[in-house]
Image (spheres, coloured by chain):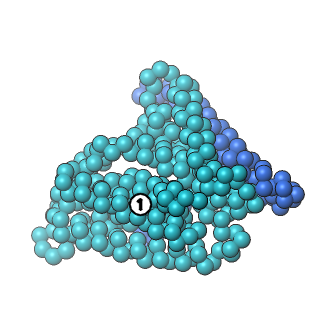
Amino acid sequence: MQLFKVLWNNTYGLLVDDGRLALGALAGLAVTGVLSALAPQATTHAYAGPVLLGWTCFLVVSNLYAAGRHALRLVESPAVHKG
Amino acid sequence: MNALFAFAMAAMPALLASLVEMVEAMTIVLAVGMTRGWRDALLGTAAGLVALAAIAVVLGTALTTLIPLHLFQVVVGTLLLLFGLRWLRKAILRFAGIVALHDEELIYQREVAVLRAQGVAKTGIDWVGLTVTCKAVLLEGLEVVFVILTLGAHSTAAFHAALWGALAAGVLVLSAGLLLRQPLTHVPENWLKFSVGALLCSFGVFWGAEGFGETWPWEATTLVAILAVFLVVSWGSVRMVRRMLPQGAHIAVRNI
């Protein structure tokens, strides 16, 4: 049972390290899917890829910016300086 | 599409990802072999490989039979994008000094200390050694299986290419481990992780968008352009995060 728990945690961990990043990627895919279902085919053929690529790049940069801000707070935290 | 290019595009990420995971598994197998004996370390490795083969058959069958054909590219693209983003984020945070770099020597020394503290079985099978190696091979190998199955999901040729990539990594790591009999500390683990993350994200975006109806202008050659975009954005992110922190700050947490 323990092994299955470890396996499940590892399988989930394969895909999700930071929940916000994973949710953002899923949201990007969902929005691209909805847009391509609603938009005319010619538009979808030309823009689905660039939209998804642009969104993913934005996601990477914004997520890392947030991680950097969090790290900065850790560096500046008095508890860290005392430690 | 050029067959050699297609082969390389599926084999390369599998080779690089497998190198990372196999080096990590090799460190644990070496630690067990050197402290508790090679028989049980190799038995544990074999047991882990058998379990991995079973998981690969079950997951591979599920992936190719349960998912409707019209959703196939989107599902595989989603899995690759999630997996790639996870590797890419971690590699960027490591380059920026926020997350601790993977240190094979340190992991080896810790593992050796833990294994020695548990004493050695005098007779019969050493279950500690066997379980530790089996678990290491299984858990590290799961990522390799995942990469091979998703990269090779859309054609037999791509599956063979991914499999050859992983096998080549296995031969390389095994040969180096047998020759050196010490952890492979000189493997540039974070560079490999960074490259694999960018490659898998590129495949994820390419197939995900194709599944939604995108017709890429130069077909699969566009993958190279998407990869270039990811590499530039990711390296830019490393520099951005480094600049946000005070000069010389090194946090090295486990995760953030």
Q: Is residue B11 left or right of residue B64?
A: left
| Residue nearer the viewer, B94 or A74 | B94
Residue B11: horizontal and vertical position, in percent? 46, 59
Taking the view exactly as shown, the residue that stands out farthest to the left is B122
The percent position of residue A29, horizontal first and vertical second, equals: 71, 55
Q: Quadrant of residue B25?
A: bottom left
- In the displayed structure image, the side of residue A70 where residue A55 appears, left or right: right
Which residue is at the far front?
A: B2
Residue under the point 68% across and 47% down: A53
What percent of the width, then of the height, locates residue B206? 64, 55
Pick the front one: B108 or B212: B212
Residue at (35%, 60%) from the top-left corner? B168
* Residue drawn at the location 47% of the way across and 20% of the way down: B247
Secondary structure, mark 1, is helix
Occupied quadrant, residue B122: bottom left
State which chain is coloured blue. Answer: A
Q: Quadrant of the N terminus of chain B?
A: bottom right
The picture quadrant where one finds residue A39 is bottom right
Q: Is residue B158 above or below residue A44?
A: below
Three-letter amino acid code at the position of disc 1: Gly
Q: Colour of chain B?
A: cyan
Q: Eyeballing the image, is B37 above or below B227? A: below
Of residues B71 and B135, which is closer to you in this image? B71
Which residue position is annotated with label 1?
B165
- The residue depicted at 41 percent of the width and 74 percent of the height is B53
Residue B64 appears in the picture as rendered:
yes
Tell me which chain the residue with mark 1 is part of.
B
In screen coordinates, is B50 left or right of B144?
left
